[in-house]
Image (cartoon, helix red, strand yellow):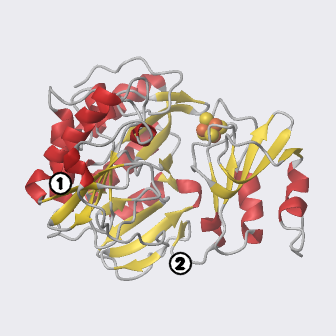
Amino acid sequence: MHPAPAPQIKGWCPGALRPMLSGDGLVVRVRPHAGRLTSVQAAGIAALAHQYGNGMLDLTSRANLQLRGIAPEAHAAVLQGLQTLGLVDSSADSESRRNILVTPFWQPDDGTQRIAATLAQALAAPDAPALPGKFGFAVDGGAQAVLRANPADIRIERGTGGYTVRADGYATGANIGIEEAVPAAMALAHWFLAQRGGLNRMAALAPLHALPERFQAATDFVPSAPKPRPGPVAAGWLVGAEFGQLQAETLAALSTLGALRMTPWQMLLIEGLQHAPALPALVTQAHDARMRVVACTGAPGCLQAAAATRPLARALAPQVPAGRLLHVSGCSKGCAHPRAALTLVATPAGFNLIRHGTAASTPDLLALAPEMIASYLFPTSDAPRI
Ligand code: SF4
């Protein structure tokens, strides 16, 4: 059993071993191995969230699961429960390095799960590179790439001869077989550390340094697929969670339907399911308006938030046109989404509006009162103002 370390008051990569204190208690982040939870693991997490937390769970943009509202004195019991489920790393540093996004659309024989497991082992090794906190990997080995819009510094994708290992921000990569995929990714990680100076992300090196010759060979990459939406897929059924948040009871019900594959899109893939689950809390169809808005925790759950975010996003969702995305953020950190067509950022004076930018971009409009936002954003809508 790991001793429970003191919770971190601030920080943006909470883990199970290094939780973050939020407005509603500790946030304990679970990183499922190779992006998958067995039914037993999912049921166990639901039970822990119910017993020790406030019963709410987050699906994160790094395809992890967060238990919320954990009292600091209950952290040790939660860790013990997670350890029993095989979901605790050997150290906080090792947990932090295991920052791996995995395509949820893998097939049993396509090598994705093998590569993800081997990569996790390599990152847990004593000689693993000491990478910056947000530095991450994407194992995106399907016939089409589905993770290109999701931040990752080193990408392993399908390619000529098997796989391609790429550095984010560069136009070329290395063609390799499956056995070489992880060693090549680790070589690229060590190269990044040698070149980085004070930089934290791979793409920041692109204007400054040419890649090693080996990573300049491949230029022909698999096509990128559009962002998936809820509904049936080859491996099962994709379900969405409003704002990426689930009740423990919903996760417990999902656990009875099959193993769960994590995604970075506020959705879970229920393996092998051939029909929409009868769980009204979940989004099961592609055109549900709830999938057109994202919002971070906001106030009162996040101590950094200047206002509540989710009630506003929920009220605006039916007016957001199909194909567009509205992001409501409690502050300029923009934890919930990197860039959207429309972003509203809470400030003490009201909401700032940013078009086609991030939560930290220069606002187009300042300090809008919540009740005025609908008329600014959707002036031709005949829907009632919020
Ligand atoms: S973006 Fe939202 S969740 Fe993130 S720190 Fe700001 S208020 Fe908190």
Quarter for ligand 1? top right
Q: Secondary structure at mark 2?
A: loop
Residue 302 visible in the shown view: yes
| Earlier sequence position, callout 1 versus callout 2 | 1
Mark linked to residue 70:
none
Residue depicted at 25% across the width and 48% down the height: 33
Residue topped by disc 2: 285
Q: Seen in the image, is 276 located left or right of residue 351? A: left
Alpha carbon separation for disc pair 1 and 2: 31 Å
Residue 248: x, y in percent? 46, 52
Image mark for residue 115: 1
The kind of residue on which mark 1 rests is: Ile
Q: Position of residue 363 (x, y in %)?
A: 78, 44
Q: Quadrant of residue 289?
A: bottom right
Within 8 Å: ligand 1 and the Cβ of disc 2?
Answer: no
105 or 254, which is in the foreground? 105
